[in-house]
Amino acid sequence: MRDNERVTSAIREPETPAATTPPRLIATDLDGTLLRDDKSVSQRTVAALAAAEEAGIEVFFVTGRPARWMDVVSDHVHGHGLAICGNGAAVVDLHGGPGAHRFVKVRELPRNNALEAVGLLRDAAPGTVYAVEQTYGFYQEPAYPKLHMEVPDDLAPAEDLLADGSPTTAEPVLKILAFHPEMEPDAFLTLARLAVGERATVTRSSPSALLEISGPDVSKASTLALCCAERGISHEEVVAFGDMPNDVEMLTWAGRSYAMGNAHPDVLAAASGHTVANNDDGVAVVIEQLLNGRI
């Protein structure tokens, strides 16, 4: 998840790691990576994705977005049509189209862990407000700002939303969203990780002080690794793309990885290669080079 503000901007020729094992799977983030800032997929990128699939390379969309926000790429799925959503909390079959996605795998955030994380972060960062993301539902506290283009299913304190017998008990919790109106985003992330510890995974994909809290050991990387293991694909055969802190583990795990020209400094440091910015079709640039045998 990410709004339209870009963290940094740079236009340069891709820096590529040395060619190693031929790729069998491309894993790409969406916002700030595959998508342009206007949330469109360029024709060049559409053609590159189709060419990769035609060459026998699977393409996985790996995003912090919930399944219901995947309409931006539903028209561009090929082959298996799977996506990893919610920072690894769900594997979703996109073939049904918007509103008809099928959950193939769910890695939920246990409610007790969620409640503990909410309490600990309230103490560590007073003023934090929360929303609860589920497979289909979305709930938020009354003070949570309108950061998302949707109407919540209910408004209540997070402790009530996560309590036994609440309206949310019918579905698994995929992640908690925590927003602070004043803290610097990276400082908030560091503070939250120290406060929450191993009870949950804390990351961020927005340039604002909005954190995403998932189940223990749930990340884009860990769920991608599970999907690859099911297909007999090693991490050396994966090429990954990303731009924000929630991509770092995935970029570190993949055999080859590319930070976008507009990426967060931590992403630039984690990736084995760099490409141009999302608005300059950085993912397509690398895919074209891969298919042409130039890298």
Image: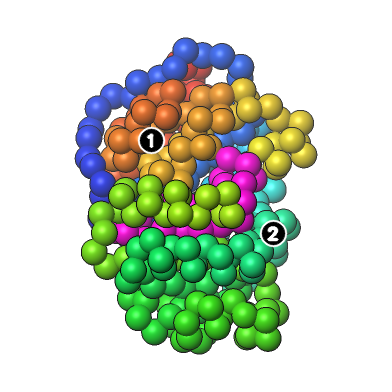
Relative side of 114 to 102, left or right: left
Which residue does the numbered mark 1 point to in the structure image? 267
Query: Which element type, helix, strand or loop, lies under badge 2?
Result: strand
For badge 1, the amino acid type reads Val
Q: Is residue 210 above or below residue 261?
A: below
User: Disc 2 and disc 1: Cα gap in Å?
Assistant: 26 Å
For badge 2, the amino acid type reads Val
Give x and y (percent) for residue 280. Answer: 29, 39
Give x and y (percent) for residue 123. Answer: 41, 66
Determine the residue positioned at 68% across, 27% down.
234
Give x and y (percent) for residue 208. Answer: 29, 58
Which residue does the numbered mark 2 point to in the structure image? 106
| Quadrant assignment, res 122 | bottom left
Tag of residue 55: none
Part of the protein shown in magenta: 201-223
Classify 10 Å Cα crowding around label 1: few (below 14), some (14-19), many (20 and above). Answer: many
Give x and y (percent) for residue 186. Answer: 32, 48
